[in-house]
Image (cartoon, rainbow, N blue to C red):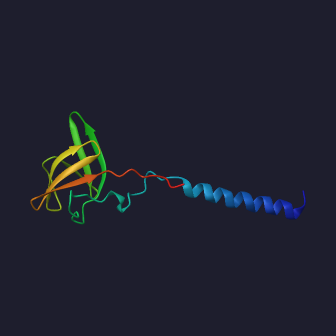
């Protein structure tokens, strides 16, 4: 194989490996703004980001703004009303705020 052909193959392999690396998902990377809250019919107050839920028969914990909270606890002026699979309800200034876990989808 000529020197020029070997360089071309090397560069092609190098470029294709970097493209594959960009598609991999890092599970330790913090969630983006895709996990912002949704209030039925209204815009949600800024400042509540749900990043995880631990849900079992004897324990329910949500991670909101990086802080673990249980039902009945307060965070950012809101009270955690309920923790369910995939969503958390808060009471905030007399309104119900629904926080939902977003699913990260890989774009094609």
The structure residue drawn at horizontal position 20% and vertical position 62%, both measured from the top left corner, is 42
- In the displayed structure, 12 sits above or below 69; it is below
Residue closest to the eye, 33 or 68: 33
Which image quadrant for residue 2? bottom right
Image location (x, y in percent) of residue 49 = 28, 59
Count how many numbered circles sit on residues in the image. 0
Q: Where is residue 9, by image quadrant? A: bottom right
Where residue 50 appears, as percent x and y from the top left, is 29, 54
Instruction: Point out the image quarter for the N terminus.
Output: bottom right
Looking at the image, the residue that sits furthest to the right is 2
Task: Give percent across and percent down for residue 21.
Answer: 59, 56
Q: Is 4 drawn above or below residue 101 in the view shown?
A: below
- The quarter of the displayed image where residue 8 is located: bottom right
Which quadrant is the C terminus positioned in?
A: bottom right
- Residue farthest to the left, as pictured: 94
Q: Residue 91: image x %, image y %?
A: 13, 55
Q: Which residue: 22% across, 33% down?
A: 57
Q: Residue at x 81, y 63 (%)?
A: 7
Farthest residue toward the front?
A: 41
54 relative position to 89: left or right: right
The image shows residue 62, relative to residue 16, as above or below, that is above
Farthest-out residue, top: 57
Residue 53 horizontal side relative to residue 11, left or right: left
């Amino acid at each position: 194989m000529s020197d020029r052909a070997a360089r071309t193959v090397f560069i092609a392999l190098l470029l294709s490996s970097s493209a594959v690396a960009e598609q991999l998902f890092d599970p330790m990377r913090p969630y983006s703004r895709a996990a912002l809250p949704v209030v039925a019919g209204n815009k949600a107050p800024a400042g509540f980001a749900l990043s995880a839920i631990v849900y079992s028969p004897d324990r329910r914990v949500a991670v909101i703004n990086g802080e673990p909270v249980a039902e009945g606890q307060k965070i950012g002026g809101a009270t955690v009303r309920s923790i369910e699979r995939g969503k958390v309800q808060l009471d905030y200034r007399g309104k119900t705020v629904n926080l939902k876990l977003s699913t990260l989808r890989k774009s094609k």
